[in-house]
Structures are given as structure tokens and as C-alpha cells.
Image (cartoon, rainbow, N blue to C red):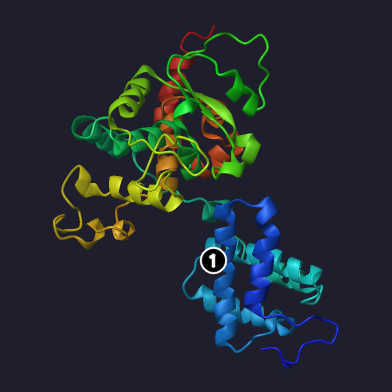
Amino acid sequence: MAESRSGSRDLSPITPRDAVERFIERRQSDSTEQTLRTYHDRLMRFVRWLEHEDILNLNVVGGRDLQEYLAYRQQTCNRTTLNNEFGTLKKFFEFLVAIEATEPAMPDRVQLLKPTASADDQTNVEKLPPERAREILEYLERFEYAGRRHVTMLLMWRFAFRLGDLRAIDVEDCSFDGEIDKERLRMIGERTENVPEEIGPHLYMIHRPESGTPLKNKSKSERIVSLTDDEVRVLQDYIDKKRTEQIDENGRRPLLTSTHGRPTNTCVRRWMYRLTQPCLVGPCPHDKDPETCEYREHGHESGCPSVKSPHKVRTGAISNMRECGISPEDVSERVDATPETIRQHYDFSDELQRLENRRERFEDLE
């Protein structure tokens, strides 16, 4: 621990909680809601530890305190988690320097203590397997055709959507007849002169932070994605027969609706947990009775050991695209991720399958 807890006369005293509130407020203009929540969660772990140690003024936090916090977190965290947490702490201490709440050397001390994580450490290969995704979709096609869950799973798997992508789609963003919507084309920054009247069925992915549906990479995430005839059939039937009409607080018609309007990220995440519980399509591998299993109860779905988070569904979907022979560049355009990101963080496709796909494409090479 630091030898003195009186603080420096050159610094402005501030409590850890007050500092975190100020930091989050400062980052609101350049961070998504999800990023802000992540920052808050990571920093509040540090705050609670400081309070437990009776350190109530950030002026007095020094390198030894950081080292002891690291040792404390190492008891329960892997290197990747700690690497991410100390990355956030560095940003936090850089902010503290700017508001004269810590010594200028503190960000560098955080960086020196930050655990290193190799590319292998940072890459999580867990994913929703393609065969399981197909089983889920076949079940929904048969028993819940064109229902909300069917549409949710279809879009998440076929397009590798993020939660924010799924929430952002309005009914009017769907062009099932392929007709070009020039207003939406302008919204995503595309030129409208000399465009064809139609291009085939498609969806517009639009960044609308002012009305509650930002996309991950802001305007860079805006794009048009094509729809197959099968996808059009399901989506059209859902809108015509199953969708509960809702207008959100901004006067928009969300494609997917909850009882309160446009679903929240938490709501969609819970849907995906329930959809990936193995008992949906087969027996429970954990010897649970689905009728009495606590993980079937509202709010407890994520406790099931076999569920997959939306990120794992996205990973599986991108891997499946690669196994089907689609290039990283083409996948990149569809799923809003760079080819490099796809190769490192998402592409866990089967190399033998990709070999056979390459063989077919090169058979006629002269």
C-alpha cells in the first residue's frame, strides 16, 4: 500500500465513485452504450476493491496499490480479462491526469502492470456449431413458422448480426420486391443518381443514434444486405401474420417487437439464450427436466451450461460462411467486420472443408 493516504497538495481530491461518474460522462460522446456499460462494470470492480481497502481518495493511489489489485484479480481472472480491464484502467488514469486527480506517471504504471495476452489468448473459439443452428431453424420452421423467435434466429444466423443490428431494423427498412428506396440510400451516404429501379430483395442497415438504434461502428456499419427468396418468405409472412404492431417512442415501426415496443439488448440476449438451450430441439445433456429446470425461468436462461451468447452465434455464423467458401472480403461486407478481424477473431471454420471449396474453384484453372 502507499505509505501516505493524505494525498498530494498539488492534486484535487476525488472519490473513486465520483471519478468513475465523471469518466463515463466524458466518454458518452465517443462511445456506444455497450462500451460505456463495459467501462462502468470494469471500473466499479476497481472502485469496490479500493473502498474495501479504505482508499477513498484517488490522489493517493500508487503503483503498489495497482499491483495488489492485479494480484487480487488474478485469483479469479485469466490474462485476457485482465488485459482488457487494465486497458480500461489506463484510459481511466489518463482521464484522472487531465483533471489533476492523479500523478502524470500513473497511466504508464498501469501499462507496465497490464498483463500481456497473445493473439491465441485473446481469441475465443467457442461458437454455435452449424449443425445445431440448422436443427434450431428446422424446429422453428416446423413449429413456430414466421414467429418472432423464428425471425430472430434466422436473421442472427444468416447475417451474423450483432444485437444492435437486429434492434435497428424497421419494417420500412425491408425491400422484399427489390425496389430501391432512394431516401434510405441517401441516409447511408450512397449516391442516388443513375441507380437501377430495383436490385433484388434487400435490407437497409442504418445508424440512427438520435432515435435509439446506433450501430456498432456508427456510419461505417451502414450497409445494404441481400435477402434470399426463403428469407423474404419468412419475413413477409411474419409481418403479415405474426408481428405485433408497435410504434416506438420515436414514431418508428421496429421489425422485431416486444410488449413494450422495440426490444432492448437485454431482451434480445435473453431470446438467444432460450433459443440455444439444447432442450429446445432434443434431450437435456445435463440431466435436467425441462418442466422444472430453473434455467427455463424468465431471467435465468443464461445459467444453462450449453447456451450460446449472441456473440457465439455470430462467431458460428461467420465461420459457417467461410466453410461455405465465401471469401473473408465478401463476408466482411455482409457482417460489418474487416477481413483481418474475421480471420483472427471469428474464422474458426474447418480447414478441410475450405480445402474442398478451393479445389472446386480451381478445377478449371488453365
Question: Is residue 218 in sight in this rendering?
Answer: yes
Q: With 139 as the anchor, is 104 left or right in this view? A: right
Residue beneath the point at 40% across and 19% down: 228
Residue that mark 1 sits on: 41
Residue 262 lies, with reference to residue 296, above or below; the image says: above
The residue closer to the viewer here, 278 or 224, is 224
Q: Splitting the image into 4 quarters, where does residue 129 fall?
A: top left
Q: Mark 1, residues whose alpha carbon is within 10 Å: few (<14), some, or many (≥20)? A: few
Q: Which residue is rendered at x = 77% and y = 76% of the image?
A: 101
Callout count: 1
**Residue sitting nearer the eye, 187 or 292:** 187
Provide residue 69's location: percent of width, then percent of height. Answer: 59, 78
Q: Horizontal and vertical percent for residue 157?
A: 39, 35
Res 276 seen here: no
Residue shown at 57%/42% (left/top)? 211
Residue closest to the eye, 168 or 210: 210
Give the residue type that dot 1 points to.
Answer: Asp
Expressed as whole percent of the image width and height from the top left, the position of residue 264 reads 44, 49
Name the element at disc 1.
Answer: helix
Image quarter of the N terminus: bottom right
Residue 148: percent from left, percent from top: 31, 37
- Vertical relation: 294 (above or below) 169: below
Residue drawn at (18%, 52%) of the image: 284
Is 152 placed left or right of 96 in the picture? left
The relative height of residue 335 versus residue 325 in the rendered view (above or below) is below
Location of the C terminus by quadrant is top right
